[in-house]
Every structure is written in structure tokens, then in C-alpha cells.
Image (cartoon, grey):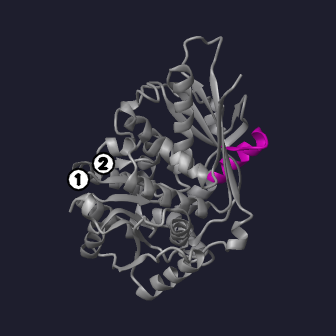
Amino acid sequence: MAQGERQYECVLLGATGYTGKYTAEHIATHLPTDFTWAIAGRSEAKLRAVADELKQLNPDRKQPEIAVAQLEKDDLVRLAKSTKVLITTVGPYVKYGTLVVEACAETGTHYLDVTGEVPWTYDMVHKHHETAKRTGAIMIMQDGMESAPSDLLAWALVSHIRDTLNVGTEEVILTIWDMVAMPSGGSLATILGMYDAFTPSQLFKAQQPWSLCPVAPPQQISTKSIFERASGARSDPDLGALADSPQGISDLPIVHRSWGLYDGGNFYGPKFRATAYMKARNVVTACGFHLALTVIFAALALSPLRWLIKKYIYEPGQGPTKEQATKEYCEWRAAANADVDDPNDPQRAYARMKWNGSMYHLTGVCLAESAFILAREKTLAHSLGGGMLTPATLGATYLERLQKAGLELEVKMLP
């Protein structure tokens, strides 16, 4: 069925879950009232309860349609054929997402999710990219707090350098500068589920920075010093003391995939690379954080410990209350080195991005705005003709809509 003949512009699968509700609320309160959509899941009663809540948020808007569907291939294909865009917030994705990806790739349905399970992303990209490209399905994974902010921040810096100096970028240094946030039960279950579903070698291979790159990566010699490799600590003249980022393993493969999707790497530049860190008080705390991360990741490989942790975390579908979420925020800062020939005149760009509120609220906003863009706008993602793409392929259109929704962003050249 052609995209123009479909019943809905968007179907949200998982609307009764924690992240799904944030997504539904943003669609109901911020997208145009003529945007046609449905909420989908296994329980009609729970879906109707969500629809009633949405009606109270925006009485002037028609309630979304209800689409009952089991997580089975036939139901998912039927659901995919009914809509231009299918959003799924049902995780862990390694457990519940594969059939959704298959249904969308096969039916030419645009697809969005918010997984942080890079090994699963790796499998889906390698198994379904060609099918999605053939059918015209634009499929964007990790389009939430992982990994849209980092991907868009890197794209914004590269674009600013390209517009200002007409040169490529050598390195984008991404940092989580400051954060107050609590994880949901779904996020914690997802992290633990990865260790249950994949072997250590699969995890290691998929989480390499260039694992998702669609073309051969640049031939580079690592710029990391022996000290940084051992300690995880780095000092930057504009960003200060930096420590390992736990999000780097999920964000960097997406950023580097964007590098390859933009004109085979030519737009970002032939020497491009991205690195990811967290702001640290000093080098000593950075070293301590590196050691702690190493111990935590090693401990999570032990199945008895994972079993014990599951006893004390939020259940999937649960998370911080709305009142708790109002106190949350996250700020990212980044610097980028332009690819210039004169070592005595280095050129640098700087960016700051901030979201005030829950990271799950931001994730819901990302999904809702992406769905609108896929259904109605034209971006690089559309001109690529489909396939397993990235948040950055939605480009300036995406960033502008997120800024209107409350995301703060500034990009400038440094003196």
C-alpha cells in the first residue's frame, strides 16, 4: 500500500508505557489538530484510559484512534500497513522490537524507536537496511535521549564549521556537562537485558565507535595518550577536565553512521571523528569515575548480580513521578576542531544544548516531532530514499522543531 493511501500519519505502539505516555501527550498538545494518529497496544481498556487522559489535556482535539495489536508478525504487519510512521516505545527492544522492525521494513513504513541497545541496533541495521531502502522505509533507531542529542549536537557543529569556514571537521568532543535525572524501569531492564541477550564478544563488537558506519571509516591514528587510555581522563582547553561517558558506547556509533550517510563522509570531513565524555571536577575524579565504570560493566556480566538488581528497580512502565521530573535537567556541551591546514591558527566551534525537565519527556518530544517530520516534511532522510538512518538525517528541520518545544541550543565559533 502506498504511503499516501494509509489511514494514519502515525501509530504509537506502547502508548500505555512510561515513555509512550510522554510521546502521546506531546502529540496531543503540540502537533497540529489535523495530524491523524492512533495509539496501539495489547489492552484496549488501557489504551482507552490513555485516550481519556489525552482528552483532558486537550479537549479541543479529537481523541486518537485505538488499535489493538499483539506483538505477533501478522498483527504488526497489519498495523504497519495502516500508517505512514510507526513509533514503538515497547522495550527491551531485543525482546519485543525485532518483529516491529521487520514489519516496517517489509511494508515501507517509516519507523522510530528509542532503544539504547546498540548490539540490537547493529543486528537490525545489518539485517534490514537493504530491505528498508528497497521499500522506501525511513527507519531511525535510538531517536531519544540515546542518541538524538549527541547526534544532533555533532551535526550542528559540523554544519556551523562548514557554513562558516567551508571546511570539514576533524574532531567533535561531546560532553554530558551536567545532569539531574532518574532512570525508568524500562531503561534499567533494557541495560540488564543486553547482558542476558548478547555474548561479551557481541557487545564489544557492536559498541565500537565505528561499528554502524555505512562506508569505510577514515584511516586514523588514535590521538588518545597512553595516560587517557589507562585513566579515561582528558583535559580540554575549552571544556576542562573530562571523564569517560557511559553513553559514549551508544552515541558514538550513531554519530559515525551519520558521518557516512552525509555524502559518504565528505560533508563532515575525511578526517572526522567523535569522542564522548562527562564533565569532571578534576583529573583525579575522572580517573575514579573511569575505575567505577570499569567495575560496574564487569559486574553486570555476572548473571546472579543482574538477578539481584532486578529485585530492587522500577518495573518496566514505571519511573519518576511528574513532580520529580520537574526537577530534572540535562546540559550537553561540545567543542569541534575544524580541519584547517595552519597549525598556528586553529579554528574551533563550541556548542551548548540544554533540556529542562525529564529526559523521558525529551524522548517523547523527539519521537513526536520526528514522526511529524517523516509524515509531512522533506529532509535528507527522505532524499536518501529509505534505509536504517539516524536522527541527524532529519537535520535543521528537526533541530528547529525541538527548539520550539523547549530544547535550548547555541552554536558559535570560538575566538
Quadrant in which the N terminus is drawn: bottom left
Q: Is residue 211 above or below residue 402?
A: above
Which residue is found at the position 56% from the left and 48% from the top? 149
Q: Tag 1 or tag 2, which sits nearer the N-term?
A: 1
Q: Residues within 10 Å of mark 2 (few under 14, many from 20)?
A: many
Quadrant in which the C terminus is drawn: top right
Q: Position of residue 12 (x, y in %)?
A: 42, 69
Depth check, front residue: 98 or 232: 98
Q: Is residue 289 above or below residue 210?
A: below
Q: Is residue 253 visible?
A: no
Which residue is found at the position 49% from the left and 29% from the top? 272
Over which residues does the magenta segment extend? 278-293
The tag on residue 135 is: 1
Q: CA distance from mark 2 to mark 1?
A: 7 Å
Which residue is found at the position 54% from the left and 68% from the top? 19
Q: Please say whether residue 118 is one of the residues in the magenta stretch.
A: no
